[in-house]
Image: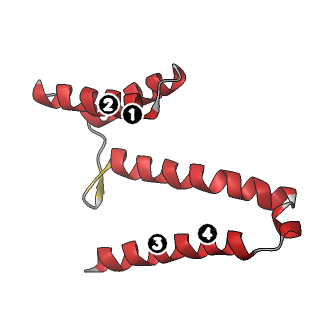
Amino acid sequence: MNIWIAVIATGLGCYAMKLGGLVAPQRVLENPSVRRFTELVPVALLTALVAVQTLTQGHALQADGPRLAGLAAAVAALLLRAPFLVVLAAAAGTAAALRLLGL
């Protein structure tokens, strides 16, 4: 049940941030520090999500080969400027293939 409290709280927080952006005065949004913050928050959140999903198993840190290889495949696809779905397919396919091979 605790996980659902976190999910709901995070959802409400995201909604509040979105609503704050819609109701904020234009002069506040034009501030360079506010603009920089709003550009970096999604990157930080996605990076944290990727790190948690890649490097944890349950409540413990665990770096396994297929997950790290999938992440490396995604990074390689991003560096090649592949479309987002190709990046996802490369990561998932790499991890699945390595798990199928028993690694």
Q: Quadrant of residue 99?
A: top left
Q: Nearer the viewer, residue 86 or 59?
A: 86
- Secondary structure beneath label 4: helix
Q: Is residue 32 visible?
A: yes
Q: How many marks?
A: 4
Q: Earlier in the sequence, mark 4 or mark 1?
A: 4
- The amino acid pointed to by label 2 is Ala
> x, y (%) of residue 57?
25, 53
Of tags 3 and 4, the one toward the viewer is 4
Q: Is residue 69 visible?
A: no
Q: Which residue is mark 4?
A: 18
Q: State whether residue 85 is above or below residue 40.
A: above
Q: Which residue is mark 2?
A: 89
Q: CA distance from mark 1 to mark 2?
A: 6 Å
- The amino acid pointed to by label 1 is Leu
- Give residue 10's mark: 3
Q: 10 Å neighbourhood of mark 4: few (<14), some, or many (≥20)?
A: few
- Give residue 85's mark: 1
> x, y (%) of residue 22?
69, 71
